[in-house]
Structure formats: structure tokens, C-alpha cells
Amino acid sequence: DGSAALTATRTACPYCGVGCGVIGATAAGARAVAISGDEAHPANHGRLCSKGTALGATVSLAGRLLEPTIQGRSASWDEATALVARRFRETIARHGPDSVAFYVSGQLLTEDYYVANKLMKGFIGSGNIDTNSRLCMASAVVAHKQAFGADLVPGCYEDLDLANLVVFSGHNAAWTHPVLFRRMEAAKARGQKHVVIDPRRTDTAEGADLHLALAPQSDVRLWNGLLADLIRRGAVDMDFLRDHVDGYAAVITSLAEDDQSPAAVAADCGLALADLQTFFDLFAAHPRTVSLFSMGANQSAQGVAKGLAIINAHLATGRIGKPGACPFSITGQPNAMGGRETGGMANTLAGHMDFSPEERDRVARFWGAPNTARAPGLKAIDMFEAVRDGRIKALWVMATNPAVSLPASGAVREALERCPFVVVSDCVETDTTAFADVKLPALAWGEKDGTVTNSERRISRQRTLFPPPGQARADWRIIAEVARAMGFDGFGWPHAASVFREWARLTAYENKGRLLNLEGLTRLDPQAYDALEPVQWPVDTEGRGRARLFEDGRFQTANGRARLVPVRPRGPAEATSDKFPMALNTGRIRDQWHTMTRTGLAPDLCRHAPEPYVEVHPDDARAVGLTEGALARVMTTRAEAVAVAKLSDRQRRGSLFMPMHWTDAFAPAGRANALVAPMTDPSSGQPEFKHTPARIGAY
Ligand code: SF4
């Protein structure tokens, strides 16, 4: 009746890596929220996409985990915590620290990530904690480390306004990062040029100045061809190379191993020569270029090479560390970056530290944890393989649904089934909770309190809108209680602010000039933490952030110079064959998020694509007797799925696209990632979701 006073709370959207600021208006005692965009948040200036706008429709308690359970029966927190601690302790005592593992998530807040990583790597003493960001950004992380010396994202969203040319490499920003895309559409109206490199004619490609519908997995060939062309034209920045970059001679030698004539490159990439030439001309003509890369580049058995090929073109032309010019990896998840920072990936320690004795000792000293892991743990695909073959005997899955999202998810289910002890902490029941011995109820968006880092290194607060429902608890607190029950000291934080402060202090501890430094946030008291404004790291002693890295031409390698890394084109991990002649690509759609546990609750979001579908070129459909709207059967060496056929010439001949969202709860026969082969990039461990040999037929 309008009499209830509304409280407006500034928080952040829990979906994609844009990291939009959201205002939630709530009334005391009501579990409902009116959502609007936060005009003061620099990531979105008040804009929200369909998913962010629909957040209010996802806050019901439907499907929530509200109490701990052991083998399906209700349990107290004390009992559940004691059991998890005892089973992990006993497994470690009998089989060693590498017999246990955590599989975590870019949905966790930085505080949660920090505590999980501290427990596994610092006190259990194993590297076996990996995150679903492995499926998302791992290839970009390796490329950053090789080129810049650390996992550093050079640019900021302002560069997207300032660029004269934006190249979207395997990035359907119109669907996956809509608010950023709107920003670039506005820049396009002011004259910015857009080039889209994508086998599919996506919504992003529809409005672009140029769409290069390249053959799947030919990206390295294309970017190498561009670099060779820039060299031929004399368009490389020799002063920048001399002063700031190593490896130019090696790259020239490597490029010479392939025919770099535009005709040969165009033929190998399946492109018209004139289109290729237009791309080369546009790139050469626009020093203010941002090259965005996302899942299309990263989710590949040559994902690292793709990232490096893009970065090479920028380093060679000095297009980095300058307004409107950078290679820019855009993250999928709201806190993929926070996970990378705090050591959520099996091959890094907290604070971007590696496992070198010096860096490992720095972390161990800070934690007072002499048992800190000395070697990387198993990456996601290898971790579940180790669960399946019995090397890992106790597994804790936090805030993610690997029974649907991982490749060959049938084998993942087998692994979960066989594992002697599975703990799942999550806010909702999922396909994965069905395999849990112990289920622990976690807080959801709107209840959590902590920080996330978006794609431009900006730390924002997620704030509490509602009191915790049932017995749900913050993830960091659940993990800390288990750590204490295992007998470990150093897990006694009173609130999220104190976890964050410790994390910030770690980044500043013996920092020696590293850019991941939150020095200015090391003394935040709970009030200051609560009031924290969005800020980009590094954060100086005055609390000021930095928008752009490498402006001084100094990188984070031992000699301060960036590295050009030669990369050669390779084919996909598994080639198509007579039996499986098509290339299956799985990915996201505009209005769903991950395995639909939240967005599936919003009727408006379900209207965009109400059922699992497979997009297929009309010629390919005709060849197997498929018509629009008919049920299709998609088969790979791993599994088969059923989906509605969508005939579209946006799809290249010989390719299929399936959304990855549908779960057992919505459409068990439509689970796309069950079809995907668990082949990975050898350095990053990121799976090749974009190319699984497949065949299609009528159902
Ligand atoms: Fe949320 Fe991403 Fe949409 Fe922004 S663009 S509202 S962060 S899903």
C-alpha cells in the first residue's frame, strides 16, 4: 500500500564479468526486491541487461538448501561440520593431502575464495583446489603470464569508449556482456568500427562493420597472418619493441614457417580474400584498437596460443597501456577475477604467487603455514578424472554444478558416484547435490556480504538485502568452521571485513612492486568495508585505484619487458571424421546463466529460448531430413542429446551450436556439455567446448 519504507542498498549483479552495480530496494520483513541499475557505478552507469533486470524474480526460496543434511537426513551444523572435518582428516591421514580436493566457483565472493584456498593450499598442504573459472578464463591467464609476467588485465572499460576499432574475437558480447556491448554500440554511433571474428553470425556480428566467419579453430592462423601483414607494411612500432618488448626476432622466424600471403591465410581460415584484406587495413589504420577475447578464444585446446596471437599483434604495434588500446580478456563470471587473484586455480597460490620456493615461502610465512603446498594441484578435468579413478577420495564442491557444466558430464557423474565422500555446499539443490553425502546450505545473492572483481580489475561490494533464510551460512564461514574443526589455527575471523583485510594485507606483504596490491585497503574497518566504493586494483596507500596498467611501458617480467611468444596454428584436439563430420560448439544464450539454477526461476528470462535447441545450417539440416522445429538427435563419441532443430544460415555449414544451460530439472535429454570431449589446452587445462566432432539426425 506504499506505506512500508523501502531501503535502497547498493550491490553488484551476480551474473557476468561486466560487474554491473545494482540497487535493490527492499521493505523490512518482505522477501522481495525492486531492482534498478546503479547510476554511480562506473561499470554500467545505471544500465542493466535482461538478466540483471530480472534479479527480483529469482530471490524466492524455491529449491533452496535451508539446512545441513547427512545422507539425506537433517543434521545440525555442529554435526555436519564435525563429520566433514573428520572425514577429510582421516582421508588425509591415510592417503596424504593430495587424496582430497575442492572444486569451487566464480560465483564465490573473494572472501570465500580466499578462505577455501587458505585451507587447501596453506593448511591441508595440497594444490588440489580448482575453480569453474578453469572452463572460462584459464587460457587467458596463461597467455597473460607468458606475455606480461603475471595475470594482469591491461585495460579498462573506458578504453572501449575511446577505441576507434574494436575487434571481438570469439566474443558474442551482445548476448554475453550486454551492458558493455551497449556502451560500444554508443561508441559505434560516434564512428567506432567493429570487426567480429566468429564462425557464427551472432547478434554481435549482425551489426558489425565486418564479420569474419572463419573456419573453426583457425584463429591463430588469422592473427599470425595479421601480424605478418603489419610487419610487411612497416606498421609495427619499432621504438616500442626496442624499449619494452623481447622476442621479436623469434616471432619473425616462427611466422616464416607458414605461408603468410593473404591468399594462403584467407584460404586456411575459410575467408574471402577481400574480407581478410579489409580486416588487415582496418587494424593497420587504427592505433586505438581494443581486441576483446572471451570464450570463443579461451575454450579451445589452443586457447593459450589464441590469446598470445592476439596479444602479439598489440605488443608489436605498441597498442597497450594507452587510452583506447589494449588486448582485453573479458571474464564470464562475476568473480572469476577474484578467484584468480586469491589462488582459486590449482596452479597458482594466493596473490598471483607461483610455486617457486621464494613465492611459496612468502605465502607460507604470511599465513604461518609451514605445510603450504609446494606444487600445483590437479586442474578441473584432471581432478574429476582422479576422483573417478580413486586417487581423490574426498571432494568438496562449492557453488557450482559440475554434473551439468563440465565436459563429458556423464563421466563426471560416474566420478561423483564412485567418490567415497562428497560434500556440496550451495544455496540450491542442483544436479550435483544428488551425489552429496553431506549438503551444506550456503547464502545466495542478496544474502551474501563481500566483494567481487570484474573484468577491468574493479572490486565492488555485494551487500546484504535479506536476512539469511533457514540455517544458511556464508561460504567463508562454513569453510572456516570446518578448518577449525580440523584443528587449524588462523580461521577465526569475526566478519567478512576481517577476511578481506587479511587478503588485502597478503597482497601488500613483501610485495616488491607487484601490481596485484591492495595496500590502500589493508586497514578497512567494518564500516569502511561496508561503504567501500568500486575501485580498480592496484590500490595505492591513499586508496586510489588505477584504470590502466603498463602506461610506463614496464611489465612484470624479471627484466620489466613484455614478451612476444611465437605461436603456430594447430588443428582441434579431435578432428571431425566420416562418422562425426560436424563441429559442435556449446555456449551461452542471452537470457540464461550457467545451469539455470537462478535465471530458470524468472519466467521472462525463460521466454527467450524455452527449450534446448541445436542451431544448424539449412543445407546440413536438409541433408539429414531435419526441418525447423523438429526434434534432432545430436551424437558424439561421449553421449547423445535431443534438442529442437533451429535452421539458420547464421551457422557455418558443418557446424552446430547448442546452449549449455539445460539441466536434469528442466530437460535432461538436452544437456549439451555431456556431449563434449574432455580435451584441454595442454598449458591452461581449459576444455575445448567449441569443437567436438558430432553428427546430427532426426529424432
Ligand atoms: Fe549482470 Fe552482466 Fe547483465 Fe550487467 S551485463 S546486468 S553484470 S548479467
Image (cartoon, rainbow, N blue to C red):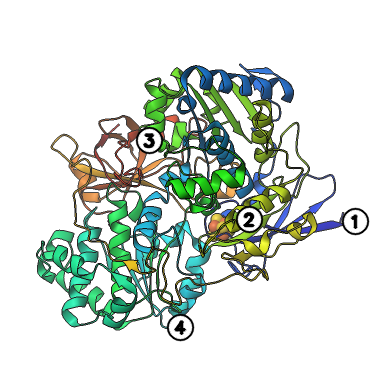
The quadrant holding residue 561 is bottom left
Q: Distance between the residues labelled 3 and 2?
A: 31 Å
| Marking on residue 504 | 2
Residue for badge 1: 3
The quadrant holding residue 234 is bottom left
Which comes sooner in the sequence, label 4 or label 2?
4
Q: How far apart are marks 1 and 4 (CA)?
A: 46 Å
Tell us which disc is closer to us: 1 or 2: 2
**Residue contact at pointers 1 and 3, CB within 8 angstroms:** no
The percent position of residue 570, horizontal first and vertical second, equals 19, 51
The quadrant where ligand 1 appears is bottom right
Residue 602 seen: no
Query: Callout 3, which amino acid?
Result: Ile
Query: Callout 1, which amino acid?
Result: Ser
Label 4 residue SS: loop
Q: How far apart are marks 1 and 2 (CA)?
A: 42 Å
* Left or right: where 147 falls relative to 150: left
The percent position of residue 60, horizontal first and vertical second, equals 69, 40
Tell us which disc is closer to us: 4 or 3: 3
